[in-house]
Structure formats: C-alpha cells, structure tokens
Image (cartoon, helix red, strand yellow):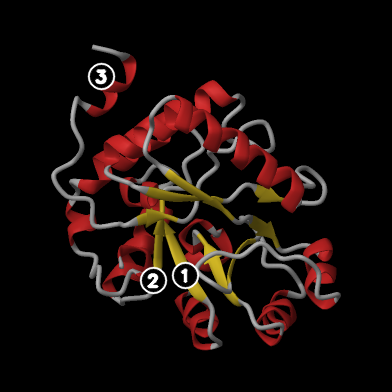
Amino acid sequence: MGFLDHLFGTSKLDHMPLKWDMHNHILFGIDDGSKNIEYSLDMAKSFIDLGFERIIATPHIMSDYYPNNRAVIEDKKNQLELALAENHLNLKIDFAAEYYMDEVFYELIKSKGDVLTFHSNHVLVETSFMNKPVFFNQLLFEVKTAGYMPVLAHPERYIYLQDDYEEAERILDIGVKFQINLMSLASYYSPMAKKFSQWLIKNGHYHFLGTDAHSINHLKVVKEVLGSKLFSQIDFNKVENAR
C-alpha cells in the first residue's frame, strides 16, 4: 500500500457532491503550494481519489510576494497537463487566480487589464486576514462595474468578519459571492473560522466550496470533512460548483 493509499484508501468516495474544485494551489513553483511537478502529480492523484474530475488551479497573485500573470500560470498548467497525460491521470485542469486586493489589483481592474477568471466572469479575491482594505468597497464596485463577479475566498477566515455578521451580510447584499474552505469545517484554521462557517451554512450564505489545497495533507483533511455532520448540512442546490 502506497503513501496515497494510506491516506485515501484504494478507491474513490462513493459520492462526491462537488463536480469541480475552484480554489487550490496545485501548480508548482509559483506560490506557497506545490513546490515541484512530482508533488503536483501526487496532489492530482489525491484529487482523483476524492472523486474530482476537474479542478481550477488558482495560484496567488500578490504583488509583493507572488507577481504571477497569465503567461507564468498557463505555462505551469500546460506542463502539469502534459505530465498528467503521460502518467495516465484523468483530471481536467483549468486555471484562474486568487487575487490579493491590493493597489496592483485595483490598477489592473481600473486599466481593464488581463484578469484571470473562472466560471465565465467570476474572479476570486482575498484580503488580509486581519484587516479589510481601506478601498474594499470601491474596489468591489470597480470589479462589478468592469463586468466581473467577485467571489470572496474563505470569508470565514477573516478575523475582521468573524464577529461582524452584519458586515458579512452587507457584502453579500452588494452582490459579492462567498466561497467557504472545506477545511474550515474541521476547525483546521481555528475554532472561530469553524463557528463562522457554521453561521454561513445555517443562513445559506455561500455560493462555492473550495479545497484551498496547498498540499496532500490538506486533501486528507478535506476527506475527513466530507463525512462530517456540518458538511451534511450544506444545501448543494446552492453550491455552484456542485452543478
């Protein structure tokens, strides 16, 4: 029995309600996810064992740390796609990005630059975990004005939202979609992140579920979540990547 068999067993789950994963860091050598193509292949095997047939790779784009762009990301995706075919791994890979809401992203939107999207016009965005950007509202307005649908990655992890349910509802009311990290349902990040996830699920405040997997161990946590009581409370008719 190999390492992946030890983690995941020898067969796929009986039922994976998610059709595709829309948030992960499987592409190698360009952010804090996979470090090399061999590890990316192992992550791909883990995704397949979980029952996924398609994933959208979303490496960070963050000006100070990960100044990625379409050319860099697409090159890594093409290399991984070729390696998947050579290893007879049936996993479709597309790509977008996880944009940090900083001044560089603001200028990209204002200048009508090349924005990497998924699900037609959706753009995945994140903020600091501690503080909301001072231009948060204006930037979301600009994103929507430019014709994109902003999807806020893992809102349950933002400390500035965890005790401010009214602010979370205000963000939803202005037309932002929410993506919950599956690992948050297992208290992987913090008890507060799980508590906020419970509130989001109870109130139907979610549109996407993502693994946000940076590693095989993350996907092991995801497997545990799939059998949890909290996961069973999700209405998958509301989850856009379950369709």
Taking depth in this image into account, of 4 and 168 the one nearest to the observer is 4
Q: 10 Å neighbourhood of mark 2: few (<14), some, or many (≥20)?
A: many
Residue drawn at the location 50% of the way across and 68% of the way down: 119
Disc assigned to residue 178: 1
Describe the element under mark 1 as helix, strand or loop.
Answer: strand
Give the position of the N terminus as an image quadrant. Answer: top left
Describe the element under mark 3 as helix, strand or loop.
Answer: helix
Disc assigned to residue 206: 2
Residue drawn at the location 50% of the way across and 46% of the way down: 24
Describe the element under mark 2 as helix, strand or loop.
Answer: loop
Q: 10 Å neighbourhood of mark 1: few (<14), some, or many (≥20)?
A: many
Is 239 left or right of 24, judged from the image as shown? left
Disc on the earlier residue, 2 or 3: 3
Whether pointer 2 and pointer 3 mark residues with C-beta atoms closer than 8 Å, the reply is: no
- The residue beneath circle 3 is 6
Is 213 left or right of 74, judged from the image as shown? left
Quarter of the image for residue 125 reads bottom right
Residue drawn at the location 63% of the way across and 55% of the way down: 97
Residue furthest to the left in view is 14
Q: 10 Å neighbourhood of mark 3: few (<14), some, or many (≥20)?
A: few
**x%, y% of residue 176?**
54, 78
Disc on the earlier residue, 2 or 1: 1
- Please state which amino acid type lies under the numbered disc 3: His
